[in-house]
Amino acid sequence: MVLALAFVMLAPVVLTATVYGIALAALGEPLLAGAVALVCRAMLLILPAVPS
């Protein structure tokens, strides 16, 4: 239950960050885009570790 709630709450954040990352990459900000992508990956790794 907690895991599902956390996923529902974080999914829009991850999607938004991914969109920003793609936009930044398109604008020629590879370092910033890479940082955003790293945060997204970290969230996706941490999320399954959250006890339900």
Image: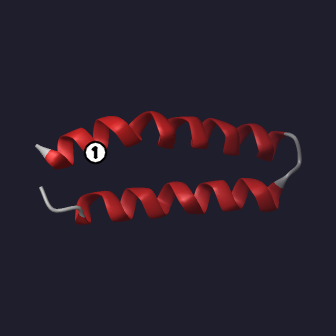
At mark 1, the secondary structure is helix
The N terminus lies in quadrant: top left
Answer above or below: position of 49 versus 10: below
Residue visible at 40% across and 38% down in the picture: 11
Q: Which residue, given by chain and number where applicable, does mark 1 sit on?
A: 6
Answer above or below: position of 16 versus 29: above
Which kind of residue does numbered mark 1 sit on? Ala
Residue 37 screen position, x and y as percent: 60, 56
Q: Which is nearer the eye, 40 or 9?
A: 9
Q: Determine crowd level at label 1: few under 14, some 14-19, many 20+ residues with C-alpha closer than 10 A.
A: some
Colour scheme of the picture:
secondary structure
Decide if residue 12 is on the left or right side of residue 4.
Answer: right
Residue visible at 51% across and 36% down in the picture: 15
The C terminus lies in quadrant: bottom left
Q: Quadrant of residue 35?
A: bottom right
Q: Quadrant of residue 27?
A: top right
Residue 19 screen position, x and y as percent: 63, 36
Residue visible at 16% across and 47% down in the picture: 2
Residue 12 screen position, x and y as percent: 45, 33
Decide if residue 36 is on the left or right side of residue 27.
Answer: left
Q: Which is nearer the eye, 12 or 21?
A: 12
Tally of marks: 1
Q: Which is nearer the eye, 45 or 13?
A: 13
In the displayed orientation, state which residue is furthest to the right: 28
Decide if residue 6 is on the left or right side of residue 33.
Answer: left
Answer above or below: position of 46 versus 1: below
